[in-house]
Image (tube, grey):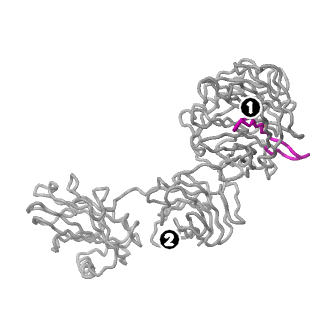
Amino acid sequence: MKRNLVVRHKLFIFFLTFHSALFSYHVVAQNPIVRDQFTADPTARVFNGRIYLYPSHDIQVAEGARPNWFCMADYHVFSSDDLTSWQDHGVIVLQEDVPWGRPNGYSMWAPDCVEKGGKYYFYFPNGPKDGRGFAIGVATADLPDGPYKLEPEPIKGVAGIDPCVFIDDDGIAYLYWSGMGLRGAKLKENMKELEGESRVMEGLPEGFKEGPFAFKRNGHYYLTFPWVRKEGGTETLAYAMSDSPLGPWTFKGVIMTEHDNGCWTNHHSLVEYKGQWYLFYHHNDFSPRDDKRRSVCIDKIAFNADGTIQEVKPTLRGVGIIPATSRLEVDRYSVSSDGVTTALNDTINTFCGFHATLPQKGSWLTFGDVDFSSVTDGYVIIRVKADENTELAVREKNAKGKIIARFKVTVKSEVTRPGAPAPFRRDQSGQWLTLTLPLDYTPKGIADLVVTCEDKAVSIDWILFRNRQRYFTPVAKNAAPSQPDERGYIRRWRLLEPIKQDIRSNVIFTDSWLRKTFADELAKLSKQKGKWYTLESDHYNMKLFRFAEKYGSQLYGNLFWCETYIDCPEDIANVRLAVGSNGASMWWLNGEEVLLLEGDRRMVEDDGVSNRFTLKKGRNVLRGAVINGPGLSDMCVHFIDEKGKPVTNFQIQ
Ligand code: FUB
């Protein structure tokens, strides 16, 4: 039975590793940084310019494991080059494979990994097959993410947990661990044996200590460790300094105070990456009622001029610049107004993440360091839960900052903003809405994102930005003339801001109705106050609906005036205008009506073809009016010759 379990676990791990290798997970992370599994006891190392994370891997208590206790069966390694996007390289060591370990010990506690002479040495604690307590083993690899080859025996003379290896500037390596106090010893050149006896580190304060992490900075040696400073307390992170790698040490104080929710352990490492020091530590965010299932977090850490360390306050936001086009978990905010709260989305499946609640009008939260450089012009998508008529705004910089988009949630009409489309989706519970709105304003570069409650309470899960698909490009005043495309389609048009029409149904588009409407509108055209836009379409057709979406005040029920200047090198006789439009349209060449497409139409190429005419040498003015009630509007226009072939020997201004 036990063997079956082992085989099944191995198969499961094989699947996960294989799956990871094929589809290695990329998560864009705030705190906690790994969002699909528990991770604890983080050791971060920089290898070849990339940051590698070696945590232990908490799982729910497995059959045969000690109840209500730590339960760890393997190690994963993760890496990143920006501290926000983490790749899971899968399992590197599995308890069943450790030659000297208990195959079902579930005691793969805090590990470490260092590089020496181009080889990677992975150190890990585990329960030995033939005894109680813990031993520390080594596995070696040619690359930081393995494959790792396990040593047949654990390191002799070491009984304990939480190995940490520090290699000094002279190349001598030291092993520190927790076992009858915090101990340290030199390692032999082979990195797998102690050189002489170990000793208890002197000068450390009274109280429980474990999880040593040693490093050197500006000639100072540091020994940092989780420390229970008061009877019945929980772990802080603390440190001592020395001028020698094995002490004696001078105790300096606390780096991080006890977790305020009672999570008993903390465990950490410090690393410098791209000129900034970071503290990696753990907390039980994804398991608030069980502090043996923990998750790795990162925050910046700073040193004083004398080398002492400044205390770190844990943040939800964590570190790193996050692209606006990835999911911004704004519930992990940097700062907020009073009363803003966060809660799990699903208290059973906690990896569904969190949401933040802004309790009242005027509440806000700020999510720092969002990179907008890849957002040109597009949409903001936001997942919210709110009552009828609740309004919220997404802003730049602060609670009074420039509005990026403003939302009004109405349960019946879903979402409204004058003139804006708001596609939405509801989740299965019917409570959460995913709303999409065009941007009123696009921040530049790196900016802080702020969500403000403009009305009643609102809960927010995440926000992300999407670029608008490009439909056309504005043409500069002195731009060179354009050419018809290879099928003769005219892509450059001057378009007047859409003119609102009260049209409930397109069945009214009869010949007589259209003639009267167009004649009335044409008479008013020179007095129209709307703005003209010169645009080059990215497609053979001009997507008038998208034009209205960007420049209009309403999407549906519009009349579009379109003009283009056709410059011919010579007279071109026997030409016909061929048009498709959605909906009806009317066309004039040099002031003369040439074509009317009546009725409710879809845009079909060459749907209407005019009588023959001559395009005169020099400038010709082609003008069109497209009208549509409900539905998408667009049009495609080209000239064709006697044989129906496109006419292309002209330029367009
Ligand atoms: O993760 C198991 C143990 O909890 C570690 O080895 C300790 O440092 C503490 O974090």
Alpha-carbon distance for marks 1 and 2?
Answer: 57 Å
Residue 337 included in the magenta stretch of the image:
no
The residue lying toward the viewer, choosing from 86 and 113, is 113
Is 541 rendered above or below residue 72? below
The residue lying toward the viewer, choosing from 337 and 423, is 337
The residue lying toward the viewer, choosing from 289 and 244, is 244
The label on residue 164 is: 1
Taking the spot 21% from the left edge, 61% from the top edge, the residue there is 652
Is 124 rendered above or below residue 156? below
Find the magenta span and give its range. 215-237
| Quadrant where the C terminus is found in the figure | bottom left
Tell me whether the residue at label 1 lies in contact with that at label 2, contact meaning CB atoms closer than 8 angstroms: no
On screen, residue 267 versus residue 16, left or right, reads right
Q: Which corner quadrant of the image does residue 251 belong to?
A: top right
Secondary structure state at the residue bearing disc 1 = strand
Q: Which residue is mark 2?
A: 417
Residue 227 included in the magenta stretch of the image:
yes
